[in-house]
Amino acid sequence: MRALFSLFLAFCLVGPAHAANAEDAAIRQLVQQFQTAIVARDGKTLGSLFVQEGGSWWSVLDEPTYAAAKARNPAAQRLEPSTWQAFAEFVAHSARPIEERFYDVRVRTNGTVASVWFDFDFLADGKVTNRGSETWQLVRTDDGWKIVAMLYSVHQ
């Protein structure tokens, strides 16, 4: 009886761990698709990674970057709203090679919602134009994981 209980307990613990690993892998694949779409300047694929309606997209300047921006333009804002659509257009119509490199990608999920956090460098023509930390909020849809919100810091 003790052996049967131990076997049952092992199956109960392995099942959720396997599901969590599968979800983590699916989310990391979404992250890879995002990076690949930027390099390919594929705005359509990039756009398909987002929930199509609603959502939120914000960039936040760190202190030195904000001070430099204010020195150039007194009307500069620390927080800048945008949309995934504007970013997809930028990617699709970029005249020069662009890339976003991600470091230390961390994923948390319960299988329905997820959070991804990483550090990044954004490159144009092979040169870093800005860097920072980025977080995505994701939801699991009938079509897989989709990005609902994005927030990132900008350090130049």
Image: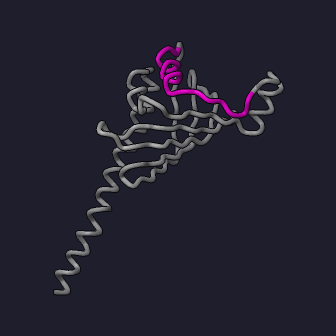
Is residue 85 on the magenta stretch? yes
At x 60%, y 42%, the residue is 133
User: The C terminus lies in which quarter of the figure?
Assistant: top right
Check the image and report above or below for 10 versus 152: below
Check the image and report above or below for 66 versus 86: below
Is residue 50 on the magenta stretch? no
Residue 95 placed where, x, y %? Answer: 53, 13
Residue 13 placed where, x, y %? Answer: 29, 69
At x 43%, y 39%, the residue is 31
Q: Residue furthest front?
A: 54
Check the image and report above or below for 86 versus 32: above
Q: Residue furthest bottom?
A: 1
Decide if residue 4 is on the left or right side of residue 112: left
At x 39%, y 55%, the residue is 110
Quadrant in which residue 75 is drawn = top right
User: The N terminus lies in which quarter of the figure?
Assistant: bottom left
Q: Which residues are magenta?
A: 77-94
Residue 11 placed where, x, y %? Answer: 23, 69
* Model colouring: one colour
